[in-house]
Image (cartoon, rainbow, N blue to C red):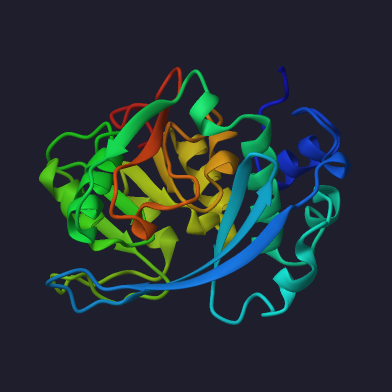
Amino acid sequence: MPHPQPRTVAELTDAVMSGAYGPDPKDLAVTSAFWLYHTTRLAGSEVTYHNHYLVLRVGQSFGACSFEAGELPPGFCENASGHTLDTLLRDGSTPVRVAALDAYLSQVQPHREAVDAEPVALPAGTPEVRARARDASIAGLLPIEPGTKVALIGVVNPLVAAIRDRGGVCLPCDLNLRTTQWGEQIADDMTEVLREADAVVATGMTLSNGTFDLVLEHCRDQGVPLVVYAQTGSAVARAFLPGGVTALNAEPFPFSQFSADATVMYRYRAAEPVSASEDGS
């Protein structure tokens, strides 16, 4: 269905609330709500990843958003089931709003039914095997040549390796990690790495911490390719193709780390991807 290209998450939310993307959010209710606390330490790594997720089910789809410890009250899910999405889209918590927006857009067009989605099967296996396959898929969306500087906003060590394997120079940035698995310093100011970058990879966590709009604006204005890897807000990030996001590796719930069996991700490419060699990169 035709709808205006949003430039910010707030614009997208307003468009959804006005019915531009389909059914009125007040007519869609959450049937189940839950949050997860999940830790991971891959073999050979000294880093333990701490992940918190809010997940909302609406109809045949799930919406998800990561959040920082203590950011979401423990009792939120107790009464969330039954709420309509129009209420949650106005919630005071960013993770709640993002999860609700993701649930709406995933219900309107599930990734599995999207004609422009490329299904990518992750193999059965250990977390290390699956993480390497996942991050190779993400890095494969990057239009890079040897020496291309790639800002990585939200650090996952196998993705650092995947960028380097493709010849890129990784510029890591994360609010929680200080060094990579190999001892490289990680910046905590994304403006520092964005300024140097020829291309950008950002995780869906940028949606939950409110930095997505800033990354999107920078890449759109400077003509820098932006690849998003999203468990958080995978359908939200999809709405910005081609409005700044040039490619997306979407992984809707249930996420790959919760299974040892083969699972599916969905890759998208904008119709006219931005080249890292264009002026302003």
Q: Is residue 164 left or right of residue 101?
A: left
Number of labels in the image equals 0
Expressed as whole percent of the image width and height from the top left, the position of residue 5 reads: 66, 28
- Residue shown at 42% from the left, 29% from the top: 268
**Vertical comparison of 127 with 199: above or below:** below
Expressed as whole percent of the image width and height from the top left, the position of residue 142 reads: 28, 35
Task: List the single residue furthest toward the front.
Answer: 261
Q: Name the foreground residue: 152 vs 1.
A: 1
- Residue shown at 83% from the left, 57% from the top: 83
Q: Quadrant of residue 183?
A: bottom left
Q: Name the foreground residue: 37 vs 217.
A: 37
Q: Is residue 59 left or right of residue 210?
A: right
Expressed as whole percent of the image width and height from the top left, the position of residue 110 reads: 58, 32
- Residue shown at 38% from the left, 59% from the top: 258
Q: Quadrant of residue 34?
A: bottom right
Q: Is residue 67 visible?
A: yes
